[in-house]
Image (cartoon, coloured by chain):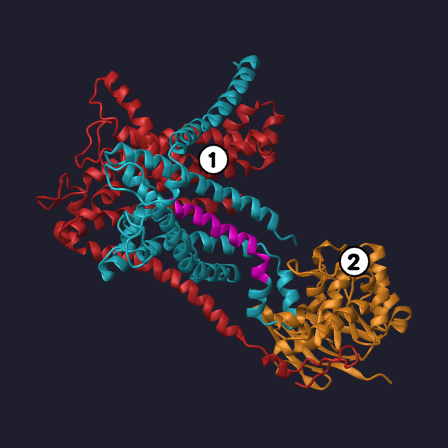
Amino acid sequence: MREFPIRRRILADKTFKIIIILLSFACILPMFFIIFFITSKGISAINWKFLTQLPKPVGETGGGILNAIIGTFILVIISILFSVPLGVFAGIFLSEYRKGRFVYFTRLSIEILQGIPSIVIGIIAYTWVVVPMGSFSALSGAVALGLMMLPVIVTATGETLKLIPDSLREASLALGVSYPRTIIKVILPAGLSGIVTGVLLSIARVAGETAPLLFTAFGSPFMNLNILKPVNSLPLMIFNYATSPYSEWHTLAWGASFVLVVLVLGLNLFTKVVTSKWKVQF
Amino acid sequence: MESTVLRIEKFSAFFGENAVLKDIDLSIPRNKITAIMGPSGCGKTTLIRCINRMHELNPDARVSGKIFLDNEDIYATDPIIVRRQIGMVFQKPNPFPTMSIYDNVIAGYNLNGIRLAKDEKERVVEESLRKAALWEEVNGTLHRRGTFLSGGQQQRLCIARALAMGPAVLLLDEPTSALDPKATSHIEELILRLKDTVTIILVTHNIAQAARVSDFTAFLYLGELVEFGLSEKMFTAPKDKKTEEYLSGKFG
Amino acid sequence: MADHSNADVLALKVDAKTVNQYKFVMSESSFRKILYLAAICVLILLVAIFFSLLLSSLPAIRHFGLGFLAGITWDPVKSEFGALPFLIGTLATSFLALILSLIFSLPISIFLGEYFRHGTASMFIKSMIELLAGIPSVIYGFCGLFLLTPVIRGLETKVGVSPYGVGIFTASLVLSIMIIPYSASIGREVISLVPSDLKEAALSLGATRFEVIRKVTLPYAYSGIFAGILLALGRALGETMAVTMVIGNSNFIPTNIFSPGNTLASVIANEFTEATGSLYLASLIELGLVLFIVTTIINVIGKIIIRRMGAGV
């Protein structure tokens, strides 16, 4: 009988653990590089003018990213209007109804919607809004972003509400409160932290999206508050400037990247901190 | 001679094809404490959930027979109205976690959209909390969340919440089984005081509790009403053999 | 129903009239109808998306038929549209990225699911993963373009290939970093769900931790890890911006790993706004349809496996 010498096995065990640890920590490297370069190259471009001015034409120095910041803001607000009401109610549906083929297919649809590539969503928003309207617009961009936010909000709402114990609902019903009021006034407030988390996280995700806006919101060098016209956003601007041949624009892109990264990561952090404080105990 | 507040006639309850209650005939006397007892699965919780029409929330649920509250058929009325007249306290205390103590007591009105003037609200809150023997302990912290209270206090808060609606009947579903002995005895004292203002139906599997607290007892076995009568008589000289076996701990 | 509450508990009587005292009254059935309506909207949305893509691609489908998928030329000038270069580009970048990412995501799954389930190390790596997942795609592309391509160019010169810097290889590298979080987090879940009594049985027989992982934990978690890989693949297939910025934008079939190319997503991103003529646009949208179908199938298979695992565990 041949047996593996114990010492070798123990050595293999220890080596394996070290390899696992090293390879796991290796993921810090790309993270580090990205944050380091964005900060070092971007922070030099940030000043008050940068944040409050519009971009200047090629050849002129200076200019800023104000229209992109405002544009991102506008797009996010409108897409919330599209996705949150529908998303919350669909989420309530999924938490109240568990069995049956209709429920199954609804659940499946949400999962499929979540997996649709962002560029395909852009094509859809183009077909549904840009073509009938005849022009690019913030509205179509918001429709695209709203479609991307929807599955996240539905899932967050549904999962949060499922966790709420039945006894809460029974307590309300036993007081003679009607079913709709029980859901809206007792169950929803109890699940609010989870729902808000879902909304905030989906905002963080779409704030950084470019692909669905390429042929919907389209981008613009001007400041625009009219939602029926094209609008710029931070990621769009970064894409356009980074792929341009002008080095002044590259600098602007680094600055804009820094702002975007701060915004997105800041929002993630904010979400974590706020909702852990807010969570309801049962 | 006691008057009857709740009359249950030939009442059966089903889950799908399965009969959980079979032909129950029972009259609950007004302003007395009636205990409902029996081994697990005998249908006692189902019975009180039929009285406040919570049983029918289950999609497979079905009932037959009649229940009268002061001579009105509760199954011929909107369940929401029935539930406002018959309060329920659950086994595990369940104050609304997002509301303060104050708002929890008033929850029945707030959630139903019934507007009370501020001084009426305060009066209802104080009266209900006093009746639930909780006022002394919480009147300084009415605006704190209800979930910060101890288990026994939370349960008394739930009692106050149910009482605030002014129900004719209060259903208690094993209200002390999740509490420690001291909290249990507080609640038992409270129940004894409450019976002057509201009729109490108490489901309990604790034979000693039923003996301590109840005026009348109903004994259920496998969905049927086996015996009903004055608690004193039932505990000392039960008429039915099954009752005697249960009370002496042979099963259950 | 008349009021039967005890009059001396409250001066206020709760009677049928007060039910309608306030502005907003909704019946249960109306509310339930609204819930159903919301669910129906979701279903309709999905169906509408599919049919929109289908209808808009119809001109191209009718013109090229199934040969579209095998067509090797994509020439807008001659109106010849074939999808093969992009299918190859997509598959090449996605699979290469998947393999590269596994080198890191599998160890991370084991790290978080076996060795460091709680504690500071665990929180640290978990946060790193979340950060990686949170960085927008365009930032990855930007950094890839400016930081990575010079390095790759140097590599290509050494190897003796044309020093584009951009190309399939660069895109795969960037993509691999981006999909690490997806397979890592699912892998971690399934590994941590392996019942501890199985592991303890193996340990009590004298196995080392490495052997337990190799012979008990990983085989048990295999289907879940596979599902995680599928989901990461689904993500890689649809990734657009980062790939677009570093893949080199060439519509010819890539000849080697360092060639420039295009993926289904990147060609749409590059050419959609310049597409003139309905055949051009329809062909691009048909590429989108293909992308939609492929990613949906992969995602659904992955989710089914995960659901089965949850039921079996």
Q: Extreme left residue here?
A: C78
Which mark identifies residue C129?
1
The answer to whether residue B159 is visible is: yes
Give the letter of the chain under mark 2: B
Task: Name the kind of residue labelled 1 in the image.
Answer: Ile
Name the magenta segment's main secondary structure. helix
Which quarter of the figure has residue C243? Answer: top left
Q: Residue at x 27, y 50 (%)?
A: A218
Q: Quadrant of the C terminus of chain C?
A: top right
- The location of residue B112, given as percent across then percent down, is 62, 73
The answer to whether residue A175 is visible is: no
Q: Which residue is mark 2?
A: B152
Q: Residue at x 68, y 78 (%)?
A: B11
Of residues B61 and C68, the one drawn nearer to the viewer in this rendering: C68
Of residues C228 and A88, the one drawn nearer to the viewer in this rendering: A88
Spatial separation of the CA atoms under disc 1 and disc 2: 45 Å
Instruction: Give the color of chain A as drawn.
Output: cyan
Q: Secondary structure at mark 1?
A: helix
From this view, report whether residue B190 is shown above or below residue C167: below
Instruction: Give the color of chain C as drawn.
Output: red
Of residues C68 and B150, the one drawn nearer to the viewer in this rendering: B150
Tell me the magenta residue range: A187-208
Residue A189 located within the stretch drawn in magenta: yes
